[in-house]
Image: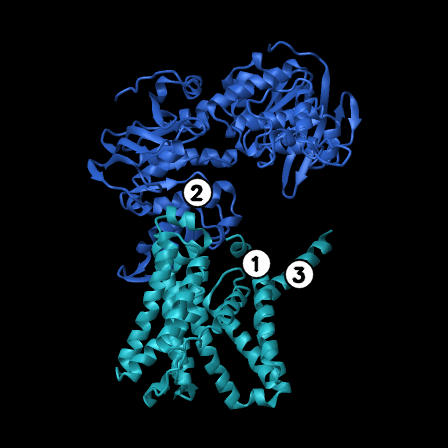
Chain colours: A blue, B cyan
């Protein structure tokens, strides 16, 4: 179907410029959407994708440039305008009212009423059938929308867009909240919409998905448009190069082979349905990537290893010694560190300053004369300074509140908190989430450098590119179990992705 | 454009300054106005009396601040003060001697603090429900022990704590300053204090940084209970009697003082010297109103209004409203 392009241009944005204080967010960006196509809009976090979408939606006003709908110049100054022009925007949070029924959610705010002004649910359920090209929802239309699977919530919102006679549907990072089976379902719905002549703009930073669904792709990097190309003309390597501005092999620093001694061995670790009977090992100096979709148990495994959740069973052996980890305190004592998934709510204490955050897990090292439990400001400063400069944290001073740092620097603060404790095993859960490209690259070299120094690193990421590029070895998780154990130089991105998505592939863990 | 920007900055600077030091200036202003208008206010006797009055309230509020710092609170402090007084008085009237009496009083506070801390931090009850229940239990127990009759006839030597003077200052004031200094030191210069601050900032991050959140919250309740016990001892000594209701009135004042404190200097954060300024505001305001012969119910209303204003201004409302 990829060739089914018609020159019928529904929307065209020309020379869009947008300035935010101190930052150019969009620099003369052109963008067009044709009837019946899936147009992917890709770029790193902070590249300008969402700014462009928000301008088209009427949330932001462009400083320069114009927007044409079906060849006519239009002024879109608020979301109502864009809705009237047949544009629909679906965000990750979906804008669902959980306790209202599916039907009510579809007709949100535009309920049919009878002569007494009463809303009639039965009428609404009937009307859902009348929506042209409606996407079938696999649930009772009278059920509260909050009880539905995420994919059915997606379909609810898609139907809402169709009920509004939208011609272009924008989807923002749709797969981040979906489980793998649901991704297939969403893609089927997208194909259905395409056949019905709607246009889809698919915003993502995941190149793998783009290849599965899109007809054309526009790449945005550092506020500029790199180009728009039909997908049949490019391969993933080329797209990465466009998106990152350099070749994939240059993004990840070269790594040394891990050493022979096993740093961590995990046997039959379990917790409920989240983590089932997981066994693996980690060598000194090894970077072990863990891939898997949402709900595969990656984060749960990390929390379990760190003692943040209670395990049902299983053993942990560190440097040949069996250890019993029941709490983060135990884990830290054993030399394990966790950089958690949510930087703000789990990694940092926002109201405290840089040095206090860095030294938070090493307060016993700050005792005066090493035996009086009184904090030595001198030692605190020296310790914080040592690790802040070792990984190049950019802050005005160590007394700056971490709240006001950029995402990349905040992540470095969390990281140096653990460098302070001299952790031997570092678990990174989505370390580059929401971080701009430059900071990402510098985190990659820090991670590689740490491994070179002998730290065993477990890196969980939904960004398969970084899992494949950075790790020595890759575990693929699915439904709480490890489905595959791969050496990264023997595999590539598409095969890891396939393993993540397919559930019935039986793959033997390669014993090493 | 530029001049507009410059003006904006100065205005926000002024607001920032007002936000930080508004309460201090309010206190100074109040003292100034009362001193000029009311000769009775500026008499040395009244001023000494004023310092004495700050003692009990400050000690209670300082303990409360230890809990508030971590996002907890303790409604039972007034009741703890009362039951401690009863325990002390009981030991004294049975000729147990002053040291033993004080020891029993402190233990009472510690045990109740331990109970609160255990149920809140380890069992996971809401601080509100738990300490409200404890308060009711203690008040009931106090009533049962005293049968509603105040305990009198305490040995004369015992009145030094609450009525004695040292270096020309009320002894209880000196005691309070020492206690506040100790708590301030713990909060600002020890690992424990740092951990408590981190828990107040983000309990989840703190736990994932290897801080024993439950234990520290328990310690907070122990500090709160102990302070309340000390306040109870001072209170009993200054009235030379004990009954089951004597501490209850201080609860609201202590809350108000702590929240006024959270609007002072380090806005949005509870800290000891802020709390102390809060106490001074409450005590000076009440003292002035009493001298002006404003009826008692009116004073209560004004205290309530001050508390309400302080909670709003401290910007920590959300934290407590949303739980």
Q: Which residue is mark 1?
A: B315
Which numbered circle lies on residue A278? none
> Circle 3 is placed at which residue position?
B10
Q: Return the x and y of residue B277 as percentages of the image width and height.
A: 51, 72
The residue lying toward the viewer, choosing from A150 and A220, is A150
Comparing labels 3 and 1, the label whose residue is closer to the camera:
1
Contact flag, marks 3 and 1 (Cβ < 8 Å): no
For the question of whether residue B162 can be seen, the reply is: no
In this rendered view, identify the residue nearer to me: A454 or A190: A190
Is B321 placed left or right of B61 in the picture?
right
Q: Secondary structure at mark 3?
A: helix
Q: Quick check: do tags 3 and 1 share a chain?
A: yes
Q: Quadrant of residue A42?
A: top right
Residue A267 coordinates in the image, percent (x, y): 25, 31
Which residue lies at the image location 58% right of the left edge and 83% below the top edge? B290
Task: In the rendered view, tell whether residue B185 sits above or below residue B8.
Answer: below
Q: Which residue is mark 2?
A: A412
Question: Which corner quadrant of the image does residue A419 belong to?
Answer: top left
Q: Is residue A137 left or right of residue B70?
A: right
């Amino acid at each position: 179907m990829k060739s089914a392009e018609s020159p019928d241009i529904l929307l065209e944005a020309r020379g869009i410029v947008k300035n935010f204080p101190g930052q150019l967010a969009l620099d003369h960006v052109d963008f067009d959407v044709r009837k019946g196509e899936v147009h992917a809009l890709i770029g790193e976090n902070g590249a300008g994708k969402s700014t462009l979408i928000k301008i088209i939606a009427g949330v932001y006003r462009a400083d320069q440039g114009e927007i044409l709908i079906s060849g006519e110049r239009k002024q879109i100054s608020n979301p109502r305008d864009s809705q009237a022009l047949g544009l629909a925007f679906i965000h990750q949070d979906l804008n669902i009212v959980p306790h209202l029924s599916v039907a009510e959610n579809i007709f949100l705010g535009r309920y049919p009423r009878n002569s007494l002004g009463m809303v009639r649910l039965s009428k609404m359920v009937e009307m859902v059938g009348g929506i042209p090209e409606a996407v079938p929802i696999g649930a009772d239309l009278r059920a509260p929308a909050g009880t539905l699977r995420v994919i059915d919530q997606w379909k609810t919102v898609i139907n809402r867009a169709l009920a509004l006679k939208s011609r272009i549907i924008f989807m923002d990072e749709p797969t981040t909240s979906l489980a793998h089976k649901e991704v297939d379902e969403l893609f089927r719905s997208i194909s259905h919409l395409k056949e019905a002549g709607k246009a889809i703009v698919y915003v993502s930073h995941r190149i793998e998905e783009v290849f599965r669904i899109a007809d054309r792709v526009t790449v945005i990097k550092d506020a500029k448009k790199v180009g728009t190309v039909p997908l049949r003309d490019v391969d993933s390597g080329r797209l990465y190069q466009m998106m990152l501005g350099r070749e994939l092999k240059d993004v990840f620093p070269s790594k040394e082979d891990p050493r022979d001694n096993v740093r961590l061995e995990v046997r039959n670790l379990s917790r409920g349905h989240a983590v089932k009977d997981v066994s693996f090992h980690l060598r000194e100096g090894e970077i072990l990537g863990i891939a898997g979709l949402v709900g595969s148990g990656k984060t749960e495994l990390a929390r379990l290893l760190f003692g943040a959740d209670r395990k049902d069973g299983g053993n942990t052996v560190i440097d040949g010694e069996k250890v019993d980890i029941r709490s983060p305190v135990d884990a830290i004592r054993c030399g394990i560190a966790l950089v958690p998934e949510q930087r703000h709510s789990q990694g940092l204490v926002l109201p405290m300053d840089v040095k206090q955050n860095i030294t938070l897990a090493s307060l016993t090292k700050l005792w005066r004369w090493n035996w009086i439990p009184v904090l030595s400001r001198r030692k605190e400063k020296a310790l914080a300074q040592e690790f802040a400069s070792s990984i190049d944290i950019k802050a005005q001073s160590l007394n700056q509140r971490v709240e006001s740092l950029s995402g990349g620097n905040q992540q470095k603060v969390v990281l140096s908190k653990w460098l302070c404790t001299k952790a031997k095993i570092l678990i990174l859960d989505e370390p580059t989430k929401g971080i701009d490209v430059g900071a990402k690259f510098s985190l990659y070299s820090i991670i590689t450098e740490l491994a070179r120094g002998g730290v065993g690193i477990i890196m969980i990421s939904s960004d398969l590119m970084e899992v494949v590029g950075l790790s020595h070895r890759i575990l693929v998780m699915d439904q709480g179990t490890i489905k595959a154990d791969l050496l990264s130089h023997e595999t590539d991105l598409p095969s890891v992705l396939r393993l993540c998505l397919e559930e019935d592939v039986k793959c033997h863990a390669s014993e090493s | 454009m530029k001049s507009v920007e410059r003006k904006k900055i100065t205005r926000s600077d002024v607001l920032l300054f007002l936000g930080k030091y508004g309460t201090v200036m309010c206190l100074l202003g109040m003292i100034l106005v009362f001193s000029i208008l009311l000769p009775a206010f500026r008499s040395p006797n009244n001023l000494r009396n004023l310092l004495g009055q700050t003692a009990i309230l400050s000690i209670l509020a300082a303990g409360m601040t230890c809990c508030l710092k971590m996002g907890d609170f303790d409604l039972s402090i007034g009741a703890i003060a009362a039951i401690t007084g009863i325990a002390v008085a009981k030991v004294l009237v049975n000729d147990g001697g002053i040291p033993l009496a004080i020891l029993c009083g402190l233990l009472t506070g510690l045990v109740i603090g331990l109970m609160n801390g255990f149920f809140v931090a380890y069992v996971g009850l809401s601080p509100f429900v738990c300490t409200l229940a404890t308060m009711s239990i203690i008040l009931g127990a106090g009533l049962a022990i005293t049968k509603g009759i105040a305990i009198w006839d305490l040995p004369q030597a015992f009145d030094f704590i609450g009525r004695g003077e040292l270096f020309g200052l009320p002894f209880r004031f000196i005691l309070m300053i020492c206690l506040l200094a100790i708590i301030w030191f713990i909060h600002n210069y020890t690992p424990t204090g740092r951990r408590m601050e981190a828990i107040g900032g983000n309990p989840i991050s703190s736990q994932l940084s290897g801080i024993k959140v439950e234990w520290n919250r328990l310690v907070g309740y122990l500090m709160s209970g102990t302070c309340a016990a000390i306040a109870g001892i001072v209170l009993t000594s200054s009235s030379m009697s004990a009954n089951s209701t004597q501490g209850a009135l201080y609860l609201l004042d202590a809350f108000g003082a702590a929240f006024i404190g959270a609007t002072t200097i380090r806005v949005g954060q509870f800290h000891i010297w802020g709390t102390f300024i809060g106490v001074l505001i409450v005590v000076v305001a009440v003292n002035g109103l009493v001298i002006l012969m404003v009826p008692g119910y009116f004073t209560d209303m004004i205290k309530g209004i001050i508390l309400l204003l302080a909670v709003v201004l401290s910007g920590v409302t959300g934290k407590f409203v949303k739980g």
